[in-house]
Image: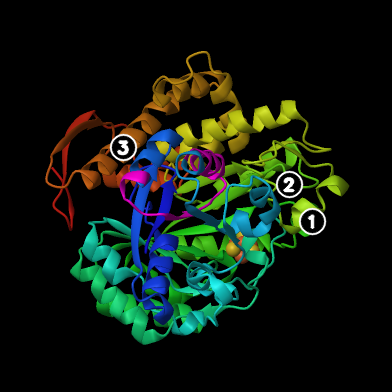
Amino acid sequence: MTVIFISIHIEKSPVAFPLASAVLKTAVEKFTGLKDCRALLEEFFMPQKASDIADRLIKTGASFFGFSVYTWNASLVIETARVLKERMPDAVIFAGGPQVTAVPGEFRKTGLFSFIVEGEGEGIVPGRLLGSAAHESIEFDFSKSASPYAKVLSEKKYSGVLWEVSRGCPYNCAFCYESRGCASIRTISEQRLIEELKLFRKMEIEKIWVLDPTFNHNKKHAENVLQMILKYNPDAHYTFEIRAELMNETLCRLFSELDASLQIGLQSTDEQVLKSVNRSLDKVKFAQKCKLMSSWGLTYGIDLIYGLPFDSIDKFCESIDFAVSSGPNNIDIFPLAVLPGTELAEKADRYGLNNEGFPSYTITGNAGFPAGDLRKAEAITSACNSLYNKEQAFPWFETILKTLELPASALFERYDADSDYGADIIDFLAREFKKAGKEALFQLFESFILWSRTAEAAFANQGTAFQVSLCRKPEQLDELINTDPETFLARHPNDKMKKYQIIFDGEELYIY
Ligand code: SF4
């Protein structure tokens, strides 16, 4: 028997690692009842034609096909299953994943799937493939499960992996699948984690996404894992999901010894909005911990969601202003998706949450956030991406806002409304300084932005020399991060424009 586990990734990127398929392949191959079963992985990337996917699957000669379903690929999975079923009526086609588990009926009623995997596939798929009386689940203990990486990494080269360190989340955010079904947190043995880290190092995996929904909810556990990483595989780049309020000096120090990015789910700053989705926020503590992370030079990003119950365009703007004031390297903003099976979906009518339905479930409006305001939020999001994220503006953004006496959301709105939208950001800011009657200060900020851009380019292109003309020495311009322009000018009166050459050798940034 040959079974194909199919992953359809959202796009080509190091994060496109077929973890669910790899986990099922391992479970099937370890299952004693399925000794003659060969499990193979097939991967595809959106957008792709269902008929092309089906053609490739049919060519494998297999007759068992299992799909990993996510919000972004659900329609394509159903379409592919339809084509497969037409061409191979006897094929056994099955599907699993968080969305399938949440709304199994939606998938069952298509009549395309021989069985639907509701819950963790390791305990269900081997028995179902065996058929007969084995239609029940087998006992599955996540903490003792076999590592899925060795075989998959030996069969194909990957530059990044999703590294599953624990399952379950102690929080219960109403919009999230994690809050349903696995409230208890289960971890993997230390020995297995160490072996996996050694394997990733041997296979030269460059990027590792740590799957642990709130990595630092248990500080001892977080410290242990970080120490393991530092000992067995310190050179890869790691991404962690953390909670800012739970950071401390020890964790900051350990993170700072790694090449790591931390992502923080803030979602909103409004008390009523947060309460409606079982969340809370201590703004003072959050800001203090962000300062602590900045003082350790950590790279961190903040996630926001707009369109939650009781949210409005004004509350969303306040959330953005607070996020910017927390000094993150990036701010990722998403419209709410009312995912089926979540607590929020069950209360959608009560909150007047309208959404696009299957498969994206993206919000189309709520009582306080009509469609027109959602479009405004989308435009602000896009401006934030251009002006803040792509420009890597975090070192200078706060000082510019203070100088222009504008909140971040207002500057994003102005950027969206700018007639020259999409042109160089320096030109847009020059116009804003002129409008504010502060054009005399702009040369200073222009040099600061050019210096930041050049340093970024040098870091990204090790060994390449970059030239830039600046009105002050780079180390003086850096003072603008914490200094208002008037104080800066008093400290560093006029200087001549001067050309600098900047080069990064992999360890130090050299300025000539
Ligand atoms: S959003 Fe994050 S913190 Fe909240 S339940 Fe989901 S995984 Fe846990």
Residue 177 vertical position relative to residue 249 in the rendered view, above or below: above
Dot 1 and dot 2 residues touching (CB under 8 Å): yes
- The residue to which callout 2 is attached is 308
* x then y, percent, for residue 413: 60, 27
In the rendered image of this protein, does residue 461 appear above or below residue 441?
A: below
Front residue of 212/75: it is 75
Number of labels in the image equals 3
Q: Secondary structure at mark 3?
A: helix
**Element at label 1:** helix
Label annotation for residue 453: 3
Q: x, y percentage for residue 117?
A: 58, 62
Q: Quadrant of residue 341?
A: bottom right
Element type where label 2 sits in the image: loop
Spot occupied by residue 258 in the image (x, y as percentages of width and height):
32, 67
Question: For mark 2, does the 10 Å Cα neighbourhood hold few (<14), some (14 to 19), or many (20 or more) residues?
Answer: many
Q: Does residue 77 show up magenta in the picture?
A: yes
**Mark 3 or mark 2, which is nearer the start of the sequence?**
2
Q: Amino acid at mark 3?
A: Arg
The residue pinned by badge 1 equals 276
Q: Quadrant of residue 380?
A: top right
In which quadrant of this rendering is ligand 1 seen?
Answer: bottom right
